Amino acid sequence: MLPRTARDLPQGRRLAALLLAVLAWVPGGAPTCPALCTCYVSPPTVSCQANNFSAVPAGLPPGARRLFLQNNVIRALRAGTFGPSTVTLWLYSNNISSIQPGTFRHLPALEELDLGDNPHLRALAPDTFHGLRRLQALHLYRCQLASLPSAIFRGLHSLQYLYLQENGLLYLQDDLFADLANLSHLFLHGNRVRALSEGVFRGLASLDRLLLHANRLAVVHRRAFRGLARLTILYLFNNSLAALPGDPLAALPALQFLRLNANPWACDCRARPLWAWFRRTRVSSSPVLCASPPRRRGTDLRHLRPADFDGCPPPRANDEDEEEEEAGDGAAAEDGGPPGAAPGRPGTLPAAPPSAFYRDLPPHDLRGPQARPHPSDYWGGYGAEGRTPPEAAGRCPGAPCAPLPSPAPAGPRPAALLPLLLPLLLPQL
């Protein structure tokens, strides 16, 4: 006797069998959402922000791609906490003071890591970020980092955005950024750096924006900016610069926006290299007001006359030779175009839009104050050096933030209904 097919069954039995099949199809080991958190299906997202967690909650779904843990009181990060599928990890505005070695080592998909606004984070191990080959944005703003290990950024060839502003950094050693060939934005403002050495920015061939304002800069090496042939924005305002000896700006052929105001510029013979650079360069610049000598106080350095330097010794011949050499190096880098497809070389990665790193949750899911800086904080200091930078948050530049899918309403799972429905369905079969 041939077995009966579903079509041969009466309609009632057919529906009962179908319902049993649906109820029995429950994905094995389906991850649950941690208590007090909200989980989204597409893309897999876990939002645990602003819940007063003192530790990363247990039971994070291993397949989650976005983890939002900001605005808690998390104190420490431990290895094995985050799953290998994590792409976006927000941990800003916590009380993190220690990061166990290996915490981020097995996160091959991670593209954005935000550890900003953790005022108890005072030191980082040299290998904290090693292995994050796909990382594009790293946020370390508003911590208490007085120094950085020399190898802290080693191997981060995909990094494009690095936020180090408003720490307590006292110095930047040579070759600190040497592996960041694709870095386009470097934010270093609001620290206590006093000098820029010759090799401090070595390797940053793709850098487009460099913000160094509101430091304590008094010395800039004549070759500090060498190799930055693609730099278009340089902020040096609100420092302690009296002069720029040796014409370091000559190494910046693509520069478009320069801010030098709020420095004690000396408009004597030391000003001639900078004055001469302004005469041969077309760039949007802030005023460069003289602080000394007294007879020139308040005069714009750019408007000095050749006669103001009549009593100065002539420029050294090697100064002019090095200036031509640096300009030639910049032109060669530009003419060469984007290098080939070798990993870690400038121009090999598509630029990620800054807006991609300021996504936030929809308004209905915000359950606490957001301390993350808005992009305007990074540019808003010019012209308002005496004011505290604004602290807006929860906004997205340009287009509105894309809303996340609404979480599914809470209710009994299909597996829980199965024992209740079996007695009703079995008589129909």
Image (cartoon, rainbow, N blue to C red):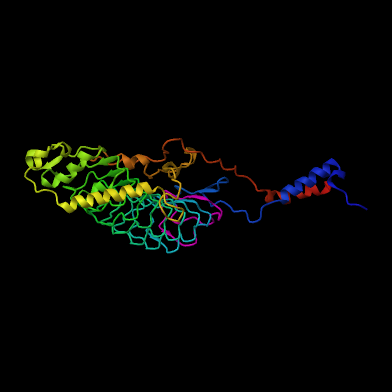
- Residue in the image at 8% along x and 46% along y: 312
Q: Is residue 423 among the parts visible in the rendering?
A: yes
Q: Is residue 82 above or below residue 272?
A: below
Q: Nearer the viewer, residue 267 or 71?
A: 267
Q: Position of residue 398 (x, y in %)?
A: 42, 36
**Most foreground residue, 238 or 49:** 238
Residue plotted at (82% across, 44% down): 14
Q: Residue 77 in magenta?
A: yes
Residue 429 left/right relative to 230? right
The answer to whether residue 190 is seen in the rendering is no
Farthest-out residue, right: 1
Q: Position of residue 247 (x, y in %)?
A: 21, 48
Magenta residues span 53-81
The quadrant in which residue 28 appears is bottom right
Q: On the rendered structure, is 245 left or right of 346? A: left
Q: Main secondary structure of the magenta part?
A: loop
User: Where in the figure is residue 240, as x and y percent of width and height?
Assistant: 18, 48
